[in-house]
Image: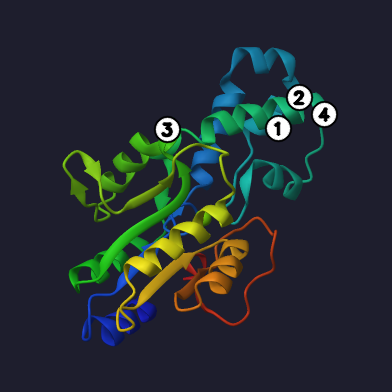
Amino acid sequence: MSEIVDEIVVESVARQRPLVIFDLDSTLFNVSLRTQAIVEAFARDPEMQMKFPSEVRFLSNFQILARDWGLKQALERAGFKSSEEFGKTIRDFWRSRFFSSEYLHHDRPYEGSREGVDRLHQAGAEILYLTGRDEKNMKIGTVESLKHWGFPLKFKGDNTANLIMKPIKGSIDDEAFKEIEMQKLVEQYSDPHHDIWFFENEPVIIERVRKTTPSVRVIWVDTTHSGRAGAPTDVTVVDFLNV
Ligand SMILES: [Mg+2]
């Protein structure tokens, strides 16, 4: 991360104020602790304890790892098997909490992510967050978490000025949402000397953005991803988990 930050600082700040865009989940923040907290809440729930005693016993000692992507994949990685009913119940339990403000305080910035953003900000880069999280369910917690961890946030009156979120959950998929928002940003910052950088963990989003807005300089944050597209092979990589 610090090498890329150096590059952006040296290459761009000297010329003009660059725009540096960051995804949040699995790019700046390790979200595995959010899932861990939800699993623990499930295991403490008296109704779940009664309905799924053996599953709850397993979950009580289950550790979500930083490279796990979501809960389903974590359980598969552990070789855990159970009924369809349990699968559906825990998936619903997880989804309704993971995509809400309530559990966002469990997230932790990756080591080095906050320092990198801060250095860019100090050097004069414009910082913007572009996330698939939705405003309705996740804005309050997102603003709190960014503030809590000291990520630079700008306000216009009461409203955030450098945080772009999906208005409504499920209204559009993440790659289409980010493709459209990135096109708007490229138009807005149309000066050819004004570099736009984009840090993102999800290959399917990277593919889309590179195709539609090739002038954007993409950095792949290699933490964890859905696997819906393969790892990009010809972009600069940040590896927060291998330092
Ligand atoms: Mg992400």
Residue 160, how many percent across, how many down? 26, 46
For the residues labelled 3 and 2, say whether their Cβ atoms are less than 8 Å apart: no
Q: What element carries label 3?
A: helix
The residue beneath circle 2 is 54
Q: Are there few (<14), some (14-19), or many (20+) residues within 10 Å of tag 1?
A: few
Is label 1 or label 4 in front?
Answer: 4
For the residues labelled 1 and 4, say whether their Cβ atoms are less than 8 Å apart: no
- Pointer 2 residue Cβ closer than 8 Å to ligand 1: no
The residue beneath circle 3 is 136
Residue 226, how many percent across, how many down? 65, 55
For the residues labelled 2 and 1, say whether their Cβ atoms are less than 8 Å apart: yes
The residue beneath circle 4 is 84
Q: Is mark 1 on a helix, strand or loop?
A: helix
Left or right: 159 as drawn, with respect to 83: left
Q: What element carries label 4?
A: helix
Question: Considering only order in the chain, which callout, 2 or 3, is on the residue closer to the N terminus?
Answer: 2
For the residues labelled 4 and 3, say whether their Cβ atoms are less than 8 Å apart: no
Left or right: 113 as drawn, with respect to 120: right
Nearer to the camera, 165 or 184: 184
Report, in whole angstroms, how far the alpha carbon at label 1 lies from the one at label 3: 34 Å
Report, in whole angstroms, how far the alpha carbon at label 4 lies from the one at label 2: 15 Å
Q: In this view, does 57 lie above or below 184?
A: above
Query: Can you see residue 66?
Result: no
Q: Is residue 184 above or below residue 232?
A: above
Q: Are there few (<14), some (14-19), or many (20+) residues within 10 Å of tag 3?
A: some
The residue depicted at 25 percent of the width and 64 percent of the height is 118
Report, in whole angstroms, how far the alpha carbon at label 3 lies from the one at label 2: 36 Å
Model colouring: rainbow
The residue beneath circle 1 is 58
Say which amino acid is labelled 3: Lys
Nearer to the camera, 170 or 90: 170
Question: Considering only order in the chain, which callout, 3 or 4, is on the residue closer to the N terminus?
Answer: 4
